[in-house]
Image (cartoon, rainbow, N blue to C red):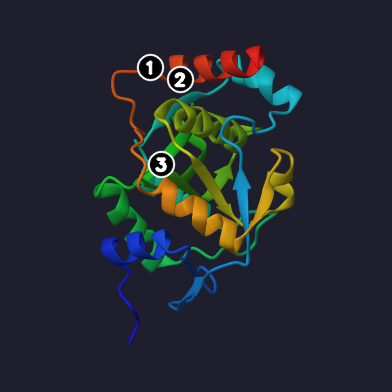
Amino acid sequence: MQLVLTTELLLEAYKQGLFPMAYSAGSPYIHWICPEMRGQLSIEDIHIPRRLKKTLHSDLYEVRIDTAFEEVITACAAPMPDRPETWINEPIIEAYCRLHKDGYGHSVECWKDDELVGGVYGLAIGGAFFGESMFSKKRDASKVALIHLVARLWKGGFMLLDTQFINDHLKQFGVYEMQHKDYIEQLKLAVVTEADFWLQDMEEDRVIGDYLEMREKG
C-alpha cells in the first residue's frame, strides 16, 4: 500500500528536513530523502553570470508567477536530451499541484510569445523556500526564472533557499553544501519566519529591478 502524499504530510516532512522522490518518472514508488549534505543558494549573493545579467535587463522573456504551475511541474517531469530520466512521477505531480492549490507550491515561469519556455517550481513554508526542479526550452529561460525567484524571495523576506543537492548546473550560481545538523538549525528558524511570496500589487519588473539594483550597489 502506497503512502498518500497529503499536504499535511508533505509540510511536516519538509519541516523535518525530508523530501520525497520517485525512483523514476514511470515508477509508482516513492522514497524519502534526507541528505547528510544539503545544497543551498544564497538569496542575497547568488552568483549571476555576466551574460545572464544582460538577459535579465532585457525584455527577452515575460516572467509570470503562479499562472501555470501544473504545466511547469509536468515539463520538469518530462525527459530532456541532457536529462533522459527524472524523479517526478504522477503521484508527486498530483501532490504538488495540491500544495499549489493550498498556497504552498509556487512556480516562476518564462514566457515567449505566449508560450511557456522555461520555469522553476518549489515549496514555500514560512521563510524557507525549497526549490524542486526547473526546465528550459529556450536559452537561459530556466536561469532567468531562477534569478526572478531569488529576487522575489529577497523582497519577501525569505531566509533560506534549499536546492536539496548540488549539480553542475547550479554550480554556476554558487551553490554550496551545508551539513545536516546546521541545515536543521537554520530550517527550524526559517519555517516559523513570516515571509511573503506573492508580493501582491508589486509588478515583476519592480521586484527584479530592486534586486538587481541592490546587487549592483553591494
Left or right of 157, for residue 183: right
For the C terminus, which image quadrant? top right
Circles 1 and 2, Cβ within 8 Å, touching? The answer is yes
Label 1's element? loop
What residue appears at the point 36 percent right and 35 percent down from the top-left corner? Answer: 195
Residue in the foreground of this view, choosing between 21 and 117: 21
Return the residue found at the far left: 102
Q: Find numbered disc 2 in the image and state the secondary structure of the residue it sits on.
A: helix
Q: Which mark is residue 207?
A: 2
Residue 38 is marked as none
N-term mark: 1 or 3: 3
Front in this rendered view, residue 191 or 78: 191
Residue 46 percent location from the top left of the image: 64, 33
Rendering quarter of residue 179:
bottom right
Q: Position of residue 175 (x, y in %)?
A: 68, 45
Which disc is residue 203 wearing? 1
Q: Amino acid at mark 1?
A: Glu
Task: Provide residue 12's location: percent of width, then percent of height.
Answer: 34, 63
What whole-number distance in Å separates the C-alpha atoms at marks 2 and 3? Answer: 17 Å
* Closer to the eye: label 2 or 3: 3
| Label number found at residue 127 | 3
| Amino acid type at image mark 3 | Gly
Q: Residue extending furthest bottom?
A: 1
Q: Is residue 184 above or below residue 60?
A: below
Q: Secondary structure at mark 3?
A: loop
**Label 3 environment density (alpha carbons within 10 Å; few <14, some 14–19, many ≥20):** many
The answer to which of marks 2 and 3 sits earlier in the sequence is 3
Within 10 Å of disc 2 (Cα), the crowding (few <14, some 14-19, many 20+) is many
Give the Cα separation between the discs numbered 1 and 2.
7 Å
Q: Position of residue 158 (x, y in %)?
A: 44, 36
The reply to whether callout 1 and callout 3 are in contact (CB within 8 Å) is no
